[in-house]
Image (cartoon, grey):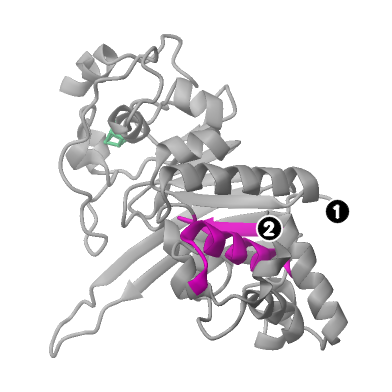
Amino acid sequence: MSGSLLKVENLTKHYPLGAGFLKKTIPVVQAVTDVSFSVEAGETLCIVGESGCGKSTLARLLMRLVEPTAGRVLIEGFDIAGLKKNLLRDWRRRMQMVFQDPYSSLNPRLTAGQIITEPAENFGRLSRRQRQALAVELLRKVGMSPELMHRLPSELSGGQRQRLGIARALALRPSLIIADEAVSALDVSVQAQILNLLMDLQQETGIALIFISHDLRVVEHIGQRVAVMYLGRIVELAPCEALFARPVHPYTEALIAAAPVPDPTRIRLEVPLQGEVPSPIQPPKGCAFHPRCPLAVERCRIEVPPLVPMADGRVVACHVRAPTMGIPAEPITANSSLSPMAQQ
Ligand code: SF4
C-alpha cells in the first residue's frame, strides 16, 4: 500500500439547530471545523482536548456514523464520503471503534464468545467450530481466559469488559482502531493494563490507533503524535515527545501546565488555563482561544490563524507563536507567555 492509511481533509461538521418562527438566521453548532491530518499504518495518533472540543464527533465522522458537512475521509486513498450503505459496510470493517463505557457498548444478553464473533458473523456465516476458535484466539489475544467465553458482560469486571470490547474490535482484523476515551472509566491500575495491551497488540499486528482522550498522562504514555483540539479545530499537531517537552500553542502549554505531573523533577510551566471553553454555537471570532489567551493581540480577534508548519515537523495555529519564520529560537518559558507581545 502506498500513501497514508487514513487521510482526513478539511473535515467539518456543523449541526444547524431548529429555526424558531420568524428567525432569520439558524444557529449552528460548530462541532468540527476544517480538520486535516493523516495516519500511517502502525502509528498511534492521539487526539486531546477539553470536554466539548469536538474529538468524539471527529471519531464518529471518521467512522461515517455521522455525515460530514464538508471535507473528505480517505481510507487507503479511497474516499468513503459518497459510499452507499452496502459498500460502506465493507470499508468500515477496516476501522473499528472501542468505546468509553464498555458496559453500555456490549449487548448485555450475549455471552463474551457471542459478542466477539458477532461482527465476523455479520460478514459471513461461521461454523460452530470456527466461532469457538475465533473466540478462543481473541480472548487469549486480549489476555483473558477462554473459560470466560460463556460469561455475560455483567459477570465480568470493568477491565475484562474493556478487553472484551477490544477483542470484538479485532475480530474483523481492522487496519485501524479508534479508541474514544477507552480507559477513562477505568481505575488507574486497570488503565495501565489496557494501554499496555493496546500497545502490545499494535506491535504484534501492525494496527494503527487513533486514541482520543482528555487525559494528557495517558496520551503521553501511548502517543507517537498528538493533535490538540480546541473548539472543533486542531490548534497543534506534533510528535509526542516534542509536544510535551516544548508545547508551542498557548492552549497546549496551558493544558500541559494544568495536568498532574507524575515526575517531580519535571519543570511545570505556570500558565493557568482561565475561564470556560466558549459555546460551539457562537464561537469567538478570529482565534477561538483568544478570550482565554494571555498572548492575544488584536489580529487574534479578527483572523482565524492557519496551521503553520514548523521546523521540527509540527504544525501550529497561532498568530503569535507560529509566525511564518518558523519555530522560535528561544525556548518558551512561563515568562515568555507574558512577553511584551501579549501587551500589544
Ligand atoms: Fe493566543 Fe492569538 Fe495564538 Fe490564538 S492566535 S493562541 S489568541 S496568541
Task: Tell me how far mark 1 sits from mark 2, CA to CA.
Answer: 14 Å
The verdict on label 1 being within 8 Å of ligand 1 is no
**In the image: residue 60, left or right of residue 207:** left
Residue that appears at 41% across and 26% down: 248
**In the image: residue 272, left or right of residue 262:** left
Quadrant where the image shows the C terminus: top left
Q: Amino acid at mark 1?
A: Met
Q: Amino acid at mark 2?
A: Leu
Tell me the mark number nearer the camera, choosing from 1 and 2: 2
Residue density around tag 2, few if under 14, some if 14–19, many if 20 or more, within 10 Å: many
Numbered range of the magenta stretch: 155-182
Residue 328: % across, % down? 44, 16
Is the residue 177 above or below the residue 68 in the image? above
Ligand 1's quadrant is top left
Is the residue 263 above or below the residue 156 in the image? above
Is the residue 166 above or below the residue 333 in the image? below
Q: Secondary structure at mark 1?
A: loop
Q: In the rendered image, is residue 344 in sight?
A: no
Residue that appears at 39% across and 58% down: 54
Residue at image mark 2: 176
Residue 198: % across, % down? 63, 48
The outermost residue toward the left is 22
Residue that appears at 79% across and 64% down: 137
Indicate which disc residue 263 carries. none
Residue at image mark 1: 1
Which is more N-terminal, label 2 or label 1?
1
